C-alpha cells in the first residue's frame, strides 16, 4: 500500500473517538496496523483499552464508517487483538497532553 493512502486512512481513523477517553483511536495508539489488498479489502488491526470494553461494537462501526469515504477502500474488516496489550506508552504525545499524563 502506498504511504499516502495509508496516511489518508489513518487520518480518517483520527475521526473515530474513543467514547470513554474522548481521544481518537490513532493518537491513543489503539491502531496497530493498516493493510489493503489489491481489490481494496482493507484490514485494520487494533486493540481496545480494556478487554471488557462495552463499546467495542460502536468503535468497530465507527471505524468502518470512517473508511467508507475513501474511494480506494472497497470494504473494511476490523480485527480486534489483545497481543501486544495496549498501554499508555502507545499513546502519542498529543493524547498524553490531552489526558494530563506525563
Image (spheres, rainbow, N blue to C red):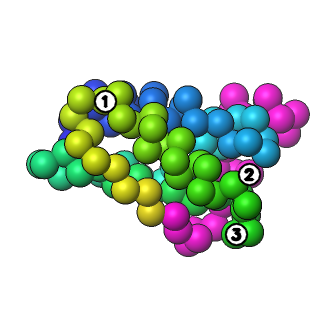
* Residue 78 left/right relative to 3: right
Q: Quadrant of residue 99?
A: top right
Nearer to us of marks 1 and 2 is 1
Which residue is the extreme one toward the right? Answer: 100
| Observer able to see residue 96 | no
Q: With respect to residue 74, does 94 lie above or below? A: above
Query: Magenta residues, as a range?
Result: 80-102
Separation of residues labelled 1 and 3 (CA atoms) = 29 Å
Mark 1 vs 3, N-terminal side: 3
* Position of residue 53 measured from the top left corner of the image (x, y, whole percent): 72, 62
> Which residue position holds label 3?
51
Residue 16, how many percent across, how many down?
Answer: 58, 36
61 relative to 90 in the view: left or right = left
Nearer to us of marks 2 and 3 is 3
- Res. 51 in view: yes
The residue that label 1 is drawn on is: 70
Q: Is residue 101 a member of the stretch shown in magenta?
A: yes
Label 2 sits on residue: 88
Q: Position of residue 23 (x, y in %)?
A: 70, 35
Assign a secondary structure to mark 3.
loop
Kindly indicate the quadrant of the structure image that contains residue 27. Answer: top right
**Residue ID at (53%, 42%):** 62
Q: Residue at x 51, y 56 (%)?
A: 46
Mark with earlier residue (2, 3): 3
Q: How many labels sit on residues?
A: 3
Residue at horizontal 45 percent and vertical 38 percent from the top: 65
Q: CA distance from mark 2 to mark 3?
A: 15 Å
Tell me: 60 left or right of 102: left
Q: Is residue 13 above or below residue 4?
A: below
Amino acid at each position: 500500500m502506498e504511504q499516502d493512502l495509508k496516511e489518508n486512512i489513518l487520518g480518517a481513523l483520527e475521526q473515530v473517538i474513543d467514547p470513554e477517553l474522548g481521544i481518537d483511536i490513532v493518537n491513543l495508539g489503539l491502531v496497530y496496523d493498516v493493510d489493503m489488498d489489491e481489490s481494496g479489502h482493507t484490514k485494520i488491526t487494533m486493540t481496545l483499552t480494556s478487554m471488557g470494553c462495552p463499546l467495542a461494537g460502536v468503535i468497530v462501526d465507527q471505524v468502518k464508517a470512517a473508511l467508507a469515504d475513501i474511494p480506494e477502500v472497497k470494504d473494511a474488516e476490523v480485527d480486534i487483538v489483545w497481543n501486544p496489550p495496549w498501554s499508555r506508552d502507545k499513546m502519542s504525545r498529543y493524547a498524553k497532553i490531552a489526558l494530563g499524563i506525563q
